[in-house]
Image (cartoon, coloured by chain):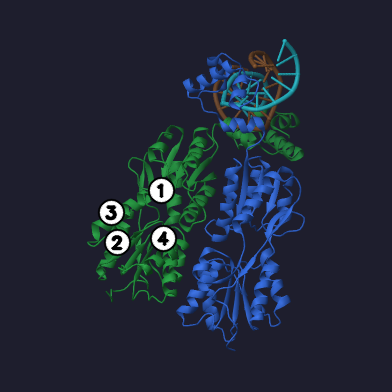
Chain colours: A blue, B green, C brown, D cyan
Amino acid sequence: MTNIRDLARVAGVSVSTVSRVLNDHPYVADDKRQAVQQAILELGYIRNQTAVHLARGRTKTIGVVLPYVDHPYYSAILQGIARRAFDAEYRFLMWQTNYEEERERLALQALSQREVEGLIVVSHALAPEEFLKFEDYGRIVFCENHPNVSTVYVDHYAGFRSGLEELIRLGHEKIGICLSREHSVNSIARKKAYFDLVPDARQEWIDTPALTVEDGARIASRWLASNERPTALLIASDYVASGVYMTLRKAGIRVPEDISLIGFDGHPLSAVMELTTISIPCEEIGGEAFRLVTESDKTERIILPFELVSRKTTSVRTNV
Amino acid sequence: MTNIRDLARVAGVSVSTVSRVLNDHPYVADDKRQAVQQAILELGYIRNQTAVHLARGRTKTIGVVLPYVDHPYYSAILQGIARRAFDAEYRFLMWQTNYEEERERLALQALSQREVEGLIVVSHALAPEEFLKFEDYGRIVFCENHPNVSTVYVDHYAGFRSGLEELIRLGHEKIGICLSREHSVNSIARKKAYFDLVPDARQEWIDTPALTVEDGARIASRWLASNERPTALLIASDYVASGVYMTLRKAGIRVPEDISLIGFDGHPLSAVMELTTISIPCEEIGGEAFRLVTESDKTERIILPFELVSRKTTSVRTNV
DNA sequence: TTGTAAGCGTTATCAG
DNA sequence: CTGATAACGCTTACAA
């Protein structure tokens, strides 16, 4: 493999001059520059990035920790990261973790080993403190609301609150909620909003996990089988809400007459399904997280807005 | 930053011994091994992967080229790649291209610059030959059916054929198809199946692009507005099919009485929507592609199966 | 504007 | 089993 030294020899210059040409430095005489470029062509030289990384002491690569790729919320965030990374000529490595702590630790290890310069933690199982132990090795940005960390997030307490307020306004009293995971920060915030706002909030009306369309089907079946049914459901994901919606309709339940449904995320699917939803800017979360991890030099907290989008799955309570 | 030399000094051994300990080589005396391990703890040593990469001449990283992350087909493949990569202790860099040639070229550049050892090209805009020019730098595996390349794919001609045969068997004559992109290899194969099999195949009954739920809504509107309507639609993605389905139902069209619908991919959504679909093993495509790019040393072609899953959106033609 | 030479932090060969 | 020492391919003071 031809290297910078071969180039120098053929071009009749020193390696530093070659390096300067390669990096578009000023102060290189035109004839030398051309000689180097000529040699590059002649020898079919291609620069070895790994060597550049080592010599520069940086990789222009960040790491992304997320539980699943195959889920609209995460893939939307990833899309946001990918876009910004491309523009900034950064690369990123991804750790798809299934929420397994061991996998998350591997990302942390990569950070300490200087493989990546920073980490975007989209969602995680490990305690935030575990991540912060590695702060010395590079910036760590979360996409969830933890105290004292750099984070880009949506206020899920307020988000859920707005959904619940809407349902209460519509006359609903028996309201159930569906949470993605039992103990995630987001779920805890959402649960708090539920108990704070809904007088008749009940533990048994909290369903979890709510991550996939299949979860939606399960939640609907459970609702159908229960003897005291909520008249409204606030569901932490449009995907899941779609599953609930379709399964209920299949069973002859009328939405919104028999039950009101509100989803979350504002996924394009919700528009086509005419699902009332709380829309959040997923791509922007990813984009901003990328910005923080690469550009910011202090702990920053960015709160992105949500918006209640009323469509056809919510209405005034009509039954008991 | 403490390095291998510091370690050697503190442990009272040579750097080679340290390296041996680090790499679990045999032939290291127990006391020296322990001395090194002691030093590692003492100095809080962490190995620099970039240096390892340079010295070893390999990065244990592959590249993935794909147009969008935020699409169930691609994210499912990505999930398959991610899983296998994790197990094999490989990392991967992703180029999210929007089908822009310039972006695809950057992935190729990374291959030639030895940043990645191989490339999985899930879908692409550049001609396959452009990719093959870079074969010297590492293995390139496609997830589409091109001649003379390593590839993992589903026979989309046969897949579409099976869907069309089903519709014909059900008595449909006026059949339309929806293709993801106009000129992709998959679309060409599918179009061929259409013209080969459907006697009354018409150019105007081919709708494209069909990639997003919104495309589904558009396709449905177009169908509603047309004066000669197909009685059946074979749609290249479940996502799009869902959009078509919901939009038609909204307009009072009965599925399958008024129109039969078949989707593609076998996405979980199709089950909940009771969509007839042609199911393919997306994750396995990714997984096998990873295997080929990292393990195989010859041009290999792997054809993965599809399966027609009949559900509630197809029936015998009842109207004209 | 250019060149020399010392890194960057490892691995790996080869002699002992 | 162990240690010198030469790679790996590039960047970057520093001196000229």
* Amino acid type assigned to the residue bearing label 2 in the image: Ser
In screen coordinates, is A18 left or right of B32? Answer: left
The residue under label 3 is B192
Q: Residue furthest left?
A: B199
| Total labels drawn | 4
Q: Are marks 3 and 2 on the same chain?
A: yes
Q: Chain of mark 1?
A: B
* Amino acid type assigned to the residue bearing label 1 in the image: Cys
Question: How far apart, in angstroms, are the residues tagged by discs 4 and 1?
Answer: 16 Å
* Amino acid type assigned to the residue bearing label 4 in the image: Ser
The mark that comes first in sequence, 1 or 3, is 1
A193, above or below A60, in the image? below
The location of residue B214, given as percent across then percent down, is 47, 62
State yes or no: discs 4 and 1 in contact (Cβ < 8 Å).
Answer: no
B286, above or below A235, in the image? above
Q: How crowded is the residue under tag 1: few (<14 C-alpha within 10 Å), some, or many (20+)? A: many
Select label 2 or label 4 by which is in front: 4
Secondary element type, mark 2: helix
The mark that comes first in sequence, 1 or 2, is 1
The residue under label 1 is B143
The residue under label 2 is B162
Question: How far apart, in angstroms, are the residues tagged by discs 2 and 4?
Answer: 15 Å
The mark that comes first in sequence, 3 or 4, is 3
The residue under label 4 is B237
Q: Nearer the viewer, residue A245 or B141?
A: A245
Q: How crowded is the residue under tag 4: few (<14 C-alpha within 10 Å), some, or many (20+)? A: many
The location of residue B275, given as percent across then percent down, is 40, 69
Examine the rendering and report whether any part of residue B268 can be seen.
yes
Question: How far apart, in angstroms, are the residues tagged by discs 1 and 3?
Answer: 19 Å
